[in-house]
Each structure stands twice: as structure tokens, then as C-alpha cells.
């Protein structure tokens, strides 16, 4: 076991004496920006932008003192506009548990567009073995020890705030400095349940929905999507589909949305997923929402989380939930920064 790094900026690890109940830390976060908790600057997640097309990220456990009732702990790693390379697979995120952290683990992060970033937040397993995150008194205090090297002091959501629950050293190094093309900002994330309840055609019009996809996304219904299609053309197809849907002509609307989705329109793919979900065709809903999620539609990520929960695939549900929350908080933080 590696001893934890100590410095003047390390957080207090105990819980200050207070009078009366306090809101849990999770209820205090309103974006990716930090809050002040009894003199410590606490983040809901640690987030960094990739400087090039690829970065190697090494995580090493320094110490762990989990609270009672916690049977496992680790770090949840998520990507926005990129992926984690694991065993030749491209994943939106992974949970790295205690045993891997104790040995020290290095993963490669790859960007799909300029502005790609990764986030880290604590995860844990409760007494029933269920994976948990984003709840209770979870939080991260960031100690910067050297360029490219930080120590994350993490409080798990079980029990009172205690930033020595999990202490992890994180080292990031550029693996490739190739510049990445710019993309547009991230769309808003809906609240849980909104994806499945939303009416097709009633979502917000966001520039991202008409932007170029991360990469051509194969689709069993339409073949390879064309990212070079005229944005006005696919928007016209989508809008015509919305008009048909509102007239009750669902079949014709879906035909138009299928063409728009094949041309790279994310909202069309999302709406097709909503229709298929309502008809109980979960396989088709998953396929369309995966297509939309690859095109930056965060609502589709929420829909996938709901769908996976319904199927009992809780690990996948948590992964999509984490990706959606990450995108939402980062987008809000970027929107709130002065120009």
C-alpha cells in the first residue's frame, strides 16, 4: 500500500461538529463547479480536458478507509466526446475498483473531437453489492502535487463526509498531441424519466442536433449514416416528420425521421427511439438511442439508462447515467464561465 501524499492543501478528513442536520453534499452541487464545505473546496467530479488526440491516465490507490456498510470502492471514469480503450474495446466509461487501483492501472483515453474531456468520481458498493455513485455525501477534494499529477481525496456517499474514504493519485500524460477538429457544445440533459416520456418533435432545438456526428454510425435500419449530408436537408426531413406525427401519421413520420437519422440528424434518431420504446420494441429503441448518443444527444443517454434499468442491466444503466450527468454538469459549467 502506498502511503498518502501529505501537504498543506490536503483536506480535513473528519466531519466538523455541527448543530442540526445538513444537506448531503450531492444536494449542494448545481454544476461541475466546486462548493465550499467547512473550508474545503469540494468538487462533484474531477474533470480535465485532453490536450491531444490521446492521453494515458494512470490511477494508483494511496489509501482507503471505507465507511461501515461499504463492501467495495473505486473510481468511475467517464469520457465526453471520446472513449476509454480497454481490451481493444471503445467504452464511454468504466468503473475501476479497489483491486485494480491497488496494483495501479493505466488506460488510454482517445478524443473524437476537440474539447474531449474525462471525469473521475468515486463509486462504491453497498451491503447488497449494488454499485452506487452521485448520491449522499460523495465529493472530491483535488490536491495538485506536480504538473500532470494530482491526488484525489474522495468522500463516498455512504455516511458523513470523510475525504480519506478513498485517496487516489492520478497521472495524465499526452500519448498523442495531434490536434482535434472542433465540435459544438453539449446539449442539455433531461431529468430522469424525461427521455421516455418526451413527445417526438417537442424537444429543444439545439445546434448540436444538426451538427456532424462523432463518426459515421452504422445502423441496421439505414446503413451507414452520412455526416456530409446538407444540414438544411436533414432538418427539413425532420421537421416534416414532426408535422406528420402531430397529424397522427406516425408511420409516415417515422419514415421521414429514418431518412433524417441516416443523414446524421440526432433528434430524428432520438425520436425514433422514443416511438419504438412506447411500442415496447426495446431492441429498436436501444439501437436508435445509441445512434443518437453517439451524435451528442444527451437525452438519448438518459433513455439508455432507463432502458437498461428496465432490463436489469444495472451496470450499463449506471454507465449511461454517469455519462449523461457528466455531460450535463460540464455543459452547465462551460455555459456559466465568462466569455
Image (spheres, rainbow, N blue to C red):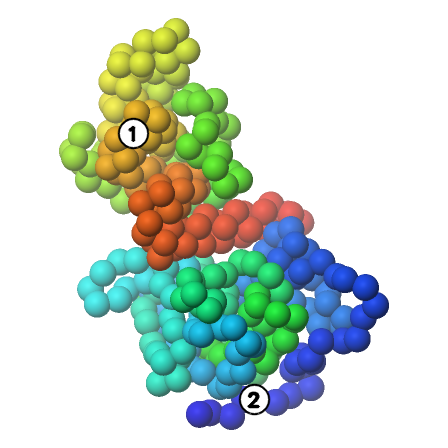
The image quarter containing residue 247 is top left
Of 131 and 46, nearer the camera is 131
Q: Residue at x 24, y 41 (%)?
A: 217
Q: Residue furthest right?
A: 19
Q: Position of residue 157 (x, y in %)?
A: 57, 65
Q: Residues within 10 Å of mark 1 (few under 14, many from 20)?
A: few
Residue identifier under label 1: 280
Of 294 and 55, nearer the camera is 294
Is any part of residue 228 visible from this angle?
no
Q: Residues within 10 Å of mark 2 (few under 14, many from 20)?
A: some
Q: Residue at x 40, y 39 (%)?
A: 303
Q: Contact (CB < 8 A) between labels 1 and 2? A: no
* Residue 5: mark: 2
Q: Is residue 47 left or right of residue 309?
A: right
Q: Is residue 71 left or right of residue 136?
A: left
Is residue 111 shown above or below 98? Answer: above
Q: Is residue 104 left or right of residue 203?
A: left
* Residue 99: mark: none
Q: Residue at x 35, y 57 (%)?
A: 315
Of 326 and 146, nearer the camera is 326
Q: Residue at x 29, y 29 (%)?
A: 280
Is residue 148 shown above or below 261? Answer: below
Amino acid at each position: 500500500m502506498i502511503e498518502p501524499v501529505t501537504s498543506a492543501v490536503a483536506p480535513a478528513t473528519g466531519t466538523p461538529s455541527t448543530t442540526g442536520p445538513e444537506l448531503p453534499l450531492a444536494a449542494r452541487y448545481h454544476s461541475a463547479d466546486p462548493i465550499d464545505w467547512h473550508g474545503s473546496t469540494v468538487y462533484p467530479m474531477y474533470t480535465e480536458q485532453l490536450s491531444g488526440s490521446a492521453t494515458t491516465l494512470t490511477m494508483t490507490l494511496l489509501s482507503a478507509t471505507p465507511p461501515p456498510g461499504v463492501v467495495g470502492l473505486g473510481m468511475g471514469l467517464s469520457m465526453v466526446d471520446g472513449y476509454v480503450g480497454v481490451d481493444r474495446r471503445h467504452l464511454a466509461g468504466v468503473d475501476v475498483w479497489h483491486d485494480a487501483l491497488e496494483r495501479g492501472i493505466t488506460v488510454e483515453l482517445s478524443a473524437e473531437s476537440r474539447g474531449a474531456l474525462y471525469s473521475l468520481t468515486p463509486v462504491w458498493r453497498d451491503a447488497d453489492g449494488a454499485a452506487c455513485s452521485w448520491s449522499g455525501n460523495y465529493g472530491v477534494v483535488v490536491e495538485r502535487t506536480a504538473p500532470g499529477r494530482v491526488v484525489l481525496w474522495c468522500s463516498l456517499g455512504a455516511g458523513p463526509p470523510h475525504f480519506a474514504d478513498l485517496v487516489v493519485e492520478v497521472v495524465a500524460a499526452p500519448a498523442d498531441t495531434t490536434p482535434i477538429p472542433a465540435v459544438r457544445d453539449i446539449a442539455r440533459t433531461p431529468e430522469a424519466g424525461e427521455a421516455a416520456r418526451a413527445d417526438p418533435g417537442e424537444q429543444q432545438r439545439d445546434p448540436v442536433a444538426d451538427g456532424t456526428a462523432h463518426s459515421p454510425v452504422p445502423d441496421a435500419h439505414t446503413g451507414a449514416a452520412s455526416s456530409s449530408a446538407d444540414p438544411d436537408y436533414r432538418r427539413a426531413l425532420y421537421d416534416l416528420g414532426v408535422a406528420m406525427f402531430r397529424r397522427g401519421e406516425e408511420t409516415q413520420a417515422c419514415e421521414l425521421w429514418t431518412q433524417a437519422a441516416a443523414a446524421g440528424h440526432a433528434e430524428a434518431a432520438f425520436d425514433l427511439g422514443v416511438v419504438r420504446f412506447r411500442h415496447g420494441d426495446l431492441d429498436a429503441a436501444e439501437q436508435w438511442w445509441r445512434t443518437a448518443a453517439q451524435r451528442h444527444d444527451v437525452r438519448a443517454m438518459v433513455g439508455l439508462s432507463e432502458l437498461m434499468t428496465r432490463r436489469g442491466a444495472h451496470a450499463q444503466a449506471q454507465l449511461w447515467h454517469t455519462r449523461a450527468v457528466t455531460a450535463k454538469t460540464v455543459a452547465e459549467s462551460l455555459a456559466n464561465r465568462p466569455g
